[in-house]
Every structure is written in structure tokens, then in C-alpha cells.
Amino acid sequence: VQARTGAPPFAPDRRPTLTLSELLASARVSQGDLPEAREVLSEWEGAESRHWLLAYHEGDWERSVILLRKEFDRTRAAGQLFDLAACGSVLGRIARIGNQRVEAEAILDESLQASVACPDLTLELFIRIELAIINADLGQFPRAKEELQRCKEILDNGEDWRGHKGAFLHTAALVKAAEHILKFVSSDGRWHIALHQRSVLLPDEVAGGFRAAIEIFRRCRAPWEETAALLYWSQALFAASQIRESFEKFEAAFAIFDQIATPQWNARLQTELFRF
């Protein structure tokens, strides 16, 4: 065609290579290697500034949300259900971590519908776990357990779900701990700020669930998920007035952050952890 028409040579399409680089950078971020993620993206002009996962884990949550919201709205308008669910699952998680629970639940509910319509079981698992955590936070245990029951059905189908099993285990442990704590206090369901004069002994399954989750995350080299499990465990112990044990888990989580995270991330997360 070029010879007959005299058209200039076709420029090689570099988008597939860029996409692979973005995926590799995401893998490096998930493994806690932010410098390597930046190195992978450095070949492409502007790629680092557009990478929402890197921005989020560097502590620039606002830029990450802007990038994700733009993509979420685009995929919704285009009717691209898989991309809508994938984008919304993370957007909902960030809103939850930022204590924007009403907004988080709305985004995750819409994303869940998209993941079921695809269907995509991996996204459905991720989203239902996020919804279970939100409902546990609010003391809405029937909905939390409903989401976990569906997750268990998916996990029990014989496939190797790797890290998702860890997320399920620590969320189930959190729900069991929260429900148990509320038996000993009178509150509006905010179990994690209901301190007692005497410590509450948590069921053995709680510690067992958290330990099993942490073991899975270490095996899968998922340090961000490991720290999440440690912080949820710390939260449950604190609410049970096991203060020394709670701070041990808290310090263990931030010891990992000191190795993989930026100071901006640490400061931002600590702010959100102590705000309900």
C-alpha cells in the first residue's frame, strides 16, 4: 500500500507496549516496589502522572480519584461493564478508606451490578469484600454476612483464588470480632469506638482468620494487603480493649509501610485511620 500510494510509512503502534508497561508497573506497585514502577513508566512521556495506582500508593489520593472518576464516567457512558466494574471497585475502596462510606457504597453497588452482568467472578469477589467491610463498619452485620456468604460460594468452587482467599479471611474475622464485641456494649452499632473498662476476649477464630490471611498475603507477596489485615486486626483488638496487642499490630503494619510507602502515604493513612 505504501509503495502504490506514496503514503508515509506507518508509525508502529506502541499502545500495546504501553499497556503492558502499565500492567507491569501496577504489579510492581502491588508488590510494594514504587521505585521500580516509576522506572517501568519512565520510558513513556506522561505515563507516570496518569497511573492512578501509583498516585494512590504515593499518597496523592486526589489525583488518583480524579483519574479513576474520569474513567468510571467514560466506561459508564460507553456501557463497558467490565471496565466500569474494575474502575468502580477501586474507586469505591478509596472512598471507603477515606471514610466516605455513603459514596463508597453507592459506587460499589453499581460496580457489583456490572461485575455480575459481565460476569466476572474476580471483580465480584473484590467488590463484595469491600461491601462487607463497609457494612461491618456500620454495624450492619446481616448485609456483611450476606456478601461474605456469596464470596464463600465463589471461593469454594475449586479454583485457586490466591490472594482473594486472604481478603475473605480477614474480612470474615473482622465481622466476627465486631459482632462479638457488640454483645458486651450498648451502642448504635459503632463497635470500633465502644471501649470497655475490661477487655473482651475475642473468639479464637478471629485471630486464626487474621493469621491465615497474613500468611497468604506474605506467600503472594502482597504487602499492602498484609498491612490492611494487620490494621483491621489492630482495630478489632482496640475495640475489645486489648490495647497493648492492638498497638503491636498497628506498629507491625507501619513497619511495613516504612519499607514500601512514601511519607505522604503514611501521613494520609494515619489521618483517616483515626477519623470515623
Image (cartoon, helix red, strand yellow):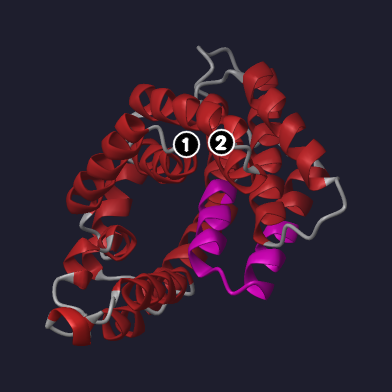
Q: Is residue 223 magenta?
A: yes
Q: Which mark is residue 115?
A: 2
Residue type, label 2: Ser
Residue type, label 1: Leu
Q: Nearer the viewer, mark 2 or mark 1?
A: 1
Which region is colored magenta? 211-233
Residue appearing at x 63%, y 19% in the figure: 143
From the viewer's perspective, tell me whether residue 149 is left or right of residue 127. right
Disc 2 and disc 1 in contact, CB within 8 angstroms: yes
Kind of element beneath mark 2: helix
Who comes first in sequence, dot 2 or dot 1? 1
Which quadrant, please, contains the N terminus? bottom left
User: In front: 92, or 192?
Assistant: 92
Residue appearing at x 72%, y 53% in the figure: 165
Task: Please rate how many residues cluster around mark 2, counting C-alpha atoms within 10 Å: few if below 14, some from 14 to 19, many from 20.
Answer: many
Q: Quadrant of residue 181?
A: top right
Q: CA distance from mark 2 to mark 1?
A: 7 Å
The residue under label 1 is: 81
From the viewer's perspective, tell me whether residue 159 is left or right of residue 94. right
